[in-house]
Every structure is written in C-alpha cells, then in structure tokens.
Image: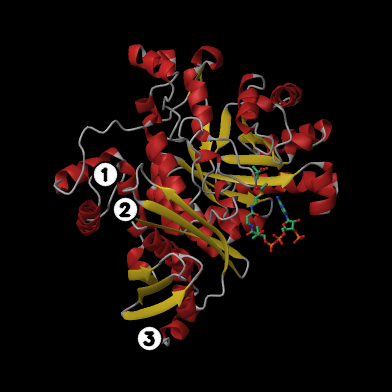
Amino acid sequence: MTDKLIIFDTTLRDGEQSPGASMTRDEKVRIARQLERLKVDVIEAGFAASSDGDFAAISAIAQVIKDSTVCSLARANEKDIGRAAEALKAANSKRIHTFIATSPLHMEKKLRMTPDQVFEQAKAAVRFARNHTNDIEFSPEDGYRSEVDFLCRVIEAVIAEGATTINVPDTVGYAVPELYGNFIKTLRERIPNSDKAVWSVHCHNDLGMGVANSLAGVKIGGARQIECTINGLGERAGNTSLEEVVMAIKTRKDYFDLAVGIDTTQIVPASKMVSQITGFVVQPNKAVVGANAFAHASGIHQDGVLKARDTYEIMRAEDVGWAANKIVLGKLSGRNAFKQRLQELGIELETETELNDAFSRFKALADQKAEIFDEDITAIVGNNAEEASDYYRFVSLSQRSETGERPFSKVIFKSGKEEFVSEAEGNGPVDATLNAIESKVKSGAEQLLYSVNAITTGTESQGEVTVRLAKGGRIVNGVGTDPDIVAASAKAYLAALNKLHDPSQHKLNAQMTV
Ligand SMILES: CC(=O)SCCNC(=O)CCNC(=O)[C@H](O)C(C)(C)COP(=O)(O)OP(=O)(O)OC[C@H]1O[C@@H](n2cnc3c(N)ncnc32)[C@H](O)[C@@H]1OP(=O)(O)O
Ligand SMILES: CC(C)C(=O)C(=O)O
C-alpha cells in the first residue's frame, strides 16, 4: 500500500524567522486559513513563548483552523511547553513540538550543558508535554551534526517517554542528499523503538540543497513527514520549499510512490499571499511558483508546446493554481463576478461590509487601469485588510520632479480623525515622499530595504512597494500597492510605521500639529 507523506508547514514559525518577514496576528491567521485550504497536515503556527504577539497569533489560529493540526514550537522546558499548551487550548487537533540541541558544538558552546544534562532535559520535556497532548514532536536541534551514538540514545529515550514524531533537523544546511538519507536510515535501523514514531526531515537551504536533502531523507531514510515552507522562506537562506517537494512527490510518483493530501491548485495562491504579506518577492525562475515557471520564450519550445504541451511541460500550470482567466474583470464588472473571483482565489471576506469595501476599492482601481488581474485583487484585499485599525492612513499626495530640479513632495495622511500635511524635498520623488512623512512622524527608524515590484505586466500595472524598517531591535516590512509607485511607496512606508507603532506613543503623536 502507498504510504502517506505528512506535510508539516512551518511558514509561520521558521518562515517568520527570515529577517524582515515578521507578520502580524491577522496576517498569520490569513496565511493559516490558506494553508488549511491547501490541506497541509500540520501548521506550525509559531513559538508561543517567544512573545505575547506570537502567543496571540497561535491562539487565534487554534480557534479558526478546523482541518489541519495546529502546532507550537517550545524549548525543552516547562515554561515554554506550558505556554504552547495554553496557546493551543482551543485547537481541534494540536501538537507540541519541543526541541533541544544535541550536537557537541551546540551543547558545549550554546547551551553550556553536558550531554547527560541534555539527555535528561529532553526526556523531562517530552514527559511534561504528555500532560497536555498525545501528539508530541521532538527535534534534536543540529541533529545532523550530532554524534550518532548519543543521538540514538536521546531519540530512543524520548520515544519511550511518548514522543510520536521524531524530526531530525539539518539546522545549518550542511548535509548532502545521499549522506543525509543514509543518516536517517541508520538512526531508524539502530534505534530499537524507532517504529513507534513517525520520522520527519527539516532541512535548511544554506547550500541550496534543502529540497534535495528532504527528498533523500524520505526516499533513502524512510521519513514520512517533511517540514517545509511556502516559497522556501526560513532562517538565513531559507527552508525546504513546500511547492517543490510536493510537486516532486506528485510528478515523480513512479519513483517516490507516496501519497500527499495537498490540494495543489492552492499552491500559487498561497505563494502569492505569502509573498505579498512578507514583501519577499518570488524570483521569476523559481520552480513551480515563479512567473516564468510555465512560460516559453523561444520559438522551438513554443512550437513544441503548441503541438503538445508535454514536450516542454512536466506539470500542468492549472494543477498548481495558475489561473487561466475566463472572465476579464474591469470597470464594467459587477459585484457577482468580483465575488466569484474572490472565491476562485480562495479569499474569504467575513462580512458583507468587507466585501462592499473591497468592491469599492476594486472599482476605484478599475477606473485607473483597463484590466484587473488576480494579483491586483489579492493586493486590494491584502493591502487594506487591517486598514481600519491602522494608526497612520494614507490620504493623497502630489509631487513635482523636473530634470535638473530637486524633487518635491507633499503628502497628506491621517491618524485617527486628525489629518497631517507634510512637505519635503529629496534625491528623487520617492525619497522626497518618505522624507515628507518622516519629517512629521519622526520615527527615527532605519530603512533597511526599499523594493518595487510590478504586480502584473506592463506599465499600467500596479506597483507593489516593500519598505523594511528597523527600530529598537525590531525589523518590520510595510507593503503598499498603487498604480502610482510614489503613492505605493508612501503607503508602504506608513504600513511599516504602523507595525513599528508603539501604542504608548499615541498621545505624543496626536499632539503633532499640522
Ligand atoms: C533552530 C531554530 O530555529 S530554534 C527556534 C528559533 N526561534 C526563536 O529563537 C524564536 C524567537 N526567540 C525569542 O523570542 C527568544 O530568544 C526567547 C523568548 C525564545 C528566549 O529569550 P531569552 O529568555 O531572552 O533568551 P535568549 O534568547 O537570550 O537565549 C536563549 C536561552 O535559551 C536556551 N536554550 C536555547 N535552546 C534551548 C532549548 N531547546 N531548550 C532549553 N533551553 C534552550 C539558551 O541556552 C539560552 O539560555 P541562557 O539564557 O541560560 O543562556
Ligand atoms: C527547531 C528545529 C526544528 C529547527 O528549526 C532547526 O533545527 O532548524
């Protein structure tokens, strides 16, 4: 019988560890809902003990997700595990994922613990987690660089304590496929109670081999869970891409002979949502979800595809969610066509008011550009999802730039009922605009990144701007979209300021005069 491969998505935990990818609670809930539509088996929603914000996000996800198991990461101590259990209380199906490093380097230099202390703490953590759930995952962090004898001893003991999933991380992306696959195989063969747990792989991408290592862990090692993220997001160079492993398993079923429960038509919508929320643009040549993944530019390829698609395509674009537009949305479209497209894109608006607001924004955009693409709709919904609670809101801008003259910008934005008008010059129109906002807000934040991405093709496309700011040890992304990239920049800057905004500063800011 064909085995099932469990897909464990960690976009909301390891993915969020990408510098600059931090997400708000509501953004995490939106992504979790999309992961559920994608039918991932497990959603690692965060690390409950890491902050009150992450705790709140996990709790909110645990309340709304019904089909996938919801999981929280926890260090191997009672405080973290207790916090994870509390955040997961409302979940239909919950998992606690506890971890402790087992490599000589991490134990000695980072944890400053002896192997015996780590052994005892790992056992105690799993035993304690058992008070809260029977679904317990244990990860020996930096497992791949651990000594095999010690690792076998730890894993055997945690399985005896009740761990039901054993995840063997290649924490620093040091493995190569054949060696990693054989490593998992050796552990499974040597540990007497290994068949009492599901074996899992978690491979980082430092040498670009996350996907290859994960697949080797499955094929050679016999692992039956892959930990992965949408668009390969993750700490440093990222993690294993969900879209790549899933489509590899499906497309090469002849080789892997495994079943996955993923609804692959939700892959591209998930990729777009994660990219839009985090501001991490997907490279055009990225497998499966890149804009060029199914595009053919050269004559011989085009000729082949026109005669028979499988000459140059090993997957069907529709199967991974690239929509073939049947109804063209524009300024003459009505509410029903708009609603239908939202459904096709897997976007759920909870109230009639939200739908009406989104429809008004759609109509306003349609007045500015002839055709509205799916990416525009995702942006319309995403860009404004949290608008009502935003501290700063963009109103309008005017700017002047002429060759040989220093550009000037005048920006109007609101905070509560108060309206602010601010003017400044800059090196370019965008610089002038951000200077104008900053001269009023005086955030003092450091700008780490500014990027512009055309959401669709052509100069009439909407520009999507990402601004990354750092202040007081926090890094946040703001994303803004508009057919005018200067306006998109102002929106993105204000969105980032909203994320940085400290409620205790409300009074101070409200005292600003125009
Ligand atoms: C490989 C991975 O991806 S692991 C997950 C990484 N994710 C995160 O770190 C999430 C964000 N982190 C945080 O918010 C914070 O680091 C917290 C809340 C987890 C901890 O914050 P602090 O208590 O201030 O500790 P800090 O981060 O400075 O140091 C980590 C401490 O945890 C200890 N520790 C690290 N891993 C573990 C573990 N698995 N089990 C138990 N203790 C651990 C370290 O030895 C260190 O202890 P020390 O303070 O006695 O030296
Ligand atoms: C906590 C574990 C699973 C991890 O993220 C890693 O080791 O990379």
Percent position of residue 452, x then y: 46, 52
Q: Check disc 1 and give the amino acid type.
A: Leu
Mark sitting earlier along the chain (1/3) = 1
Q: Is mark 3 within 8 Å of ligand 1?
A: no
- Of tags 1 and 3, the one toward the viewer is 3
Q: Secondary structure at mark 1?
A: helix
Q: Check disc 2 and give the amino acid type.
A: Val
User: Real-space Cα distance between discs 1 and 3?
Assistant: 40 Å
Q: Which residue is mark 1?
A: 342
Mark 1 neighbour density, 10 Å: few (under 14) some (14–19) many (20 or more): some
Q: Is residue 105 left or right of residue 42?
A: right
Identify the mark at residue 401; answer none if there is no mark: none
Identify the mark at residue 381; answer none if there is no mark: 2
Mark sitting earlier along the chain (2/3) = 2
Ligand 1 quarter of the rendering: bottom right
Identify the mark at residue 514; answer none if there is no mark: 3
Name the residue rendered at 36%, 32% in the picture.
322
Find residue 173 and report its image quarter: top right
Looking at the image, which is closer to me, 17 or 124?
Answer: 17
Mark sitting earlier along the chain (2/1) = 1
Q: Check disc 3 and give the amino acid type.
A: Val
Q: Is residue 281 visible?
A: yes
